[in-house]
Amino acid sequence: MLAPALDARLEAVLALVEAEAHADIGSDHAHLPIRLIREGRAGRCVVVELNPGPLALARRNVARARLHDHIEVREGDGFAPLLPGEVDSASVSGMGAGTITGILRRAGERLPPALVLQPNDSARTLRLWARENGHHLKAERLIPGHWPYPVLRLERRDGPDPAYADLPEQAALRYGPHLLREGSEVLLKLVRADIARLTPLAAPGRTAGVELDAALSALAVLGGQ
Ligand SMILES: C[S@@+](CC[C@H](N)C(=O)[O-])C[C@H]1O[C@@H](n2cnc3c(N)ncnc32)[C@H](O)[C@@H]1O
């Protein structure tokens, strides 16, 4: 296997990684690290897998690609199998934002300074985690698929994240400050769908009302009507 095909969301993750040493947490098939090495986007990779089936699959694919000198496959939970400072970057993709946030919270001093995250649901929790834990949002993508998949690149930085400047806070946390500024068709469609879904549910003080307000202010930033 020379260069496994990736779906569009993993292609977006791939394009946001640039590292000497990179860890792919919850890799499953190890297709992402294989492509990272093949394309020179990482010099060395560590694959971490919790479950025996995906662990065996990752080992098999790395061996078939003849990349065992560049990719090491380790069994374990999140960042636990890594030493502090061992990698300068990590990806966590294809899981719920709650699961990803749990993995980040447990990482402690093993957490590298750059992260590429792709949750299968809203990235709001991850953006909040980034703001509370000294990471800035450096890039965001929204990839069409079964639903729109957010992909975030975070980097450890001091001070408030300038990406949020001059944007309505709740809209930026829900939809992404870079994505709001870029204003793609995919985002506009998502915001409109949220407004249609939330309007009949919204009442003052209810969660749906707060989410509807965020969607309406996002629409205003996007210049929609
Ligand atoms: C849905 S797959 C996503 C695979 C791949 N990252 C992708 O985006 O296509 C999630 C993978 O993460 C693994 N996983 C879940 N929680 C994990 C954890 N805490 N540590 C390591 N691996 C984990 C699962 O075994 C599974 O292989």
Image: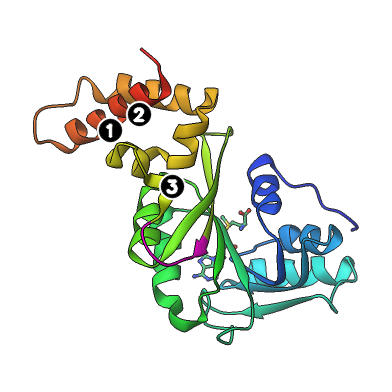
Judge depth for marks 3 and 2 and give the one in front: 3
Q: Residue at x 39, y 53 (%)?
A: 127
Residue 163: mark: 3
Residue 47: numbered disc: none
Element marked by disc 3: helix
Amino acid at dot 1 = Ala
Judge left or right: residue 201 versus residue 116: left
Where residue 182 sits in the image (x, y, percent)?
52, 31
- Marks 1,2: beta carbons within 8 A: yes
Q: CA distance from mark 3 to mark 2?
A: 15 Å
Note whether 207 is above or below 193 in the view shown: below
Tell me if 158 is positioned left or right of 24 in this view.
left
Q: Residue at x 91, y 57 (%)?
A: 2
The residue identified by callout 2 is 218
Residue 164 at x, y percent in the picture: 38, 45
Applied colour scheme? rainbow
Residue sitting at the far top: 225
